[in-house]
Amino acid sequence: MTLALPRRTLLLGLGAAGLASRAIAQTDRFVVPPLAPLRMEMGRITKVTVCLRPFRAAGPRLDVEKVGSKRVVHNYGHGGSGWSLSWGSAQIATAKALEGGTKRVAVIGCGAIGLTTALTLLRAGAKVTIYAADRTPYTRSVRATGTWSPDSRIADHDRIDAGFPALWDSMARSSYATWQTLLGRPGDPVAWSDRYGLADPIIETPPIAFPDRPVNAPEIRFFEQRLPGLAPRGHDLQPGQHPFPVSRARLSTSMQFNVAELAHLLTTDFLLEGGRIETRTFNTPADLQRLRQPVIVNCTGYGARALWKDESVVPVRGQINWLAPQPEVHYGLYYRDVNVLPRPDGIVVQYSGTSDMWGYGCEDETPDMAEAEAAIRTIAPLFEAPKAL
Ligand SMILES: Cc1cc2nc3c(=O)[nH]c(=O)nc-3n(C[C@H](O)[C@H](O)[C@H](O)COP(=O)(O)OP(=O)(O)OC[C@H]3O[C@@H](n4cnc5c(N)ncnc54)[C@H](O)[C@@H]3O)c2cc1C
């Protein structure tokens, strides 16, 4: 939806120094607040992390399977939406796990899906142990961007069954409702933040080249079209109503997961509420027979590809370039396929590719410094004097 905004006057010029203190005069209700500049410098990189989204064309696996004497409920394959959909997916897995009245449940995996599933089971009255090879802060989930993205690489529209859109809708809505209960907590595990979508630089320059990655698959298509009224809607800003040197800008407000604090909070809550965590690696499904619990929820994410020999799980590589934290920055932005999100543990700078397929089929978790540099160089001109753009 495009909202026509009232006319207002840009008081201060562009450039890094001006951006810190600029303000926009206005005649009525809307003001773009003064924005602290982002410091986009290679020298501010603190680390580069890589993670693999566990994509399944048909959507997450949530069926039940009998393995020897155990009932296994699967809960894996959430693509780029694992944090966003976790609570809703956990509710579905919990209902299946507790069918028949069992109260002793093992959860395999301690990422976003394992932690939320284990907590949901515990709160439904089960006695729960998590078994996992890795736990916070060493799971892939901890390397996520940390934004509400319920339709990111979650399925291929051409490969889902007829019931999937409604299932996805209910997972997204119940997750969203649960995330609202974690707002306003110390350390802001979940928060709202403004995001500026920027396009069309006033002084056109060629886009920075990113390293090539082979893409050998059809476009992933499944979009967030079914959640009207759930989250705040964005609106377009007119030139002169925002401080950025671009012709098109859109302001939205979105939910943010501060994953370091969030994963810690979920782990702590699980332990305080009586759950147990044990470090253990399973090499084949047969290894699960050694567990005491009759019901097992399989939340192994990308690990399910090897453990369950499930080749329907395809990696979609994503890299995050972390810059030193800037506590004074409270907004994110998206420009030329690069996403920037300020978090307490650092500034996330991430090339998302020209399509959701960027990184599809790539299992390489080695940081790519050329990608990091290209991402930072793409954003830097937004905070330089106009002539440098
Ligand atoms: C770059 C990037 C950015 C992302 N950003 C977002 C975002 O902003 N918002 C969002 O909602 N989602 C995002 N995602 C997606 C999200 O990170 C994933 O969907 C999510 O991490 C999947 O969680 P999981 O718990 O299924 O898997 P994992 O976090 O991988 O956890 C798997 C667990 O299972 C354990 N395990 C695996 N195999 C075995 C085994 N054989 N034996 C024992 N234990 C095992 C692991 O040790 C681990 O504890 C992003 C992903 C990437 C790559």
Image (spheres, grey):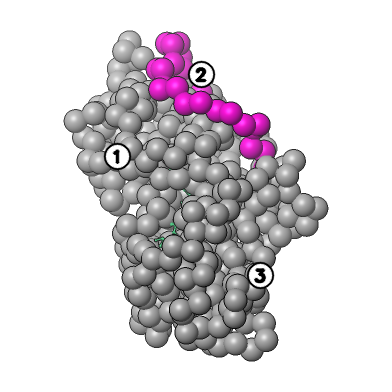
Q: Which mark is residue 48?
A: 1
Q: Quadrant of the N terminus?
A: top right
Front residue of 244 and 382:
382
- Alpha-carbon span between mark 3 and mark 2: 49 Å
Which numbered disc, 3 or 2, marks the residue closer to the eye? 3
Q: Which residue, given by chain and number where applicable, does mark 2 sit on?
A: 200
Q: State which quadrant residue 12 falls in.
A: top left
Q: Which mark is residue 64?
A: 3
Examine the structure image and report whether residue 143 is included in the region drawn in magenta: no
User: Residue at horizontal 55%, vertical 44%?
Assistant: 314
User: Of label 3 and label 2, which has the lower sequence position?
Assistant: 3
Lateral position of residue 56 relative to residue 131, left or right: right
Q: Amino acid at mark 2?
A: Asp
Q: Quadrant of the C terminus?
A: top left
Residue 317 against residue 313 in the figure, above or below: above
Q: Give residue 196's position: percent from left, percent from top.
A: 47, 35
Front residue of 46 and 255:
46
User: What's the magenta region?
Assistant: 199-222
Front residue of 337 and 3:
337
Residue 108 against residue 376 in the figure, above or below: below
Label 1 crowd bin: few (<14), some (14–19), many (20+), radius 10 Å: many
User: Residue at horizontal 77%, vertical 52%?
Assistant: 161
Q: Give residue 147's position: percent from left, percent from top.
A: 47, 49
Q: Give residue 102's position: percent from left, percent from top.
A: 60, 87
User: Of label 1 and label 2, which has the lower sequence position?
Assistant: 1
Q: Amino acid at mark 1?
A: Val
Badge 1 marks a residue whose secondary structure is strand
Badge 2 marks a residue whose secondary structure is strand
Can the viewer see residue 389? Answer: yes
Badge 3 marks a residue whose secondary structure is strand
User: Of label 3 and label 1, which has the lower sequence position?
Assistant: 1
Lateral position of residue 325 relative to residue 156, left or right: left
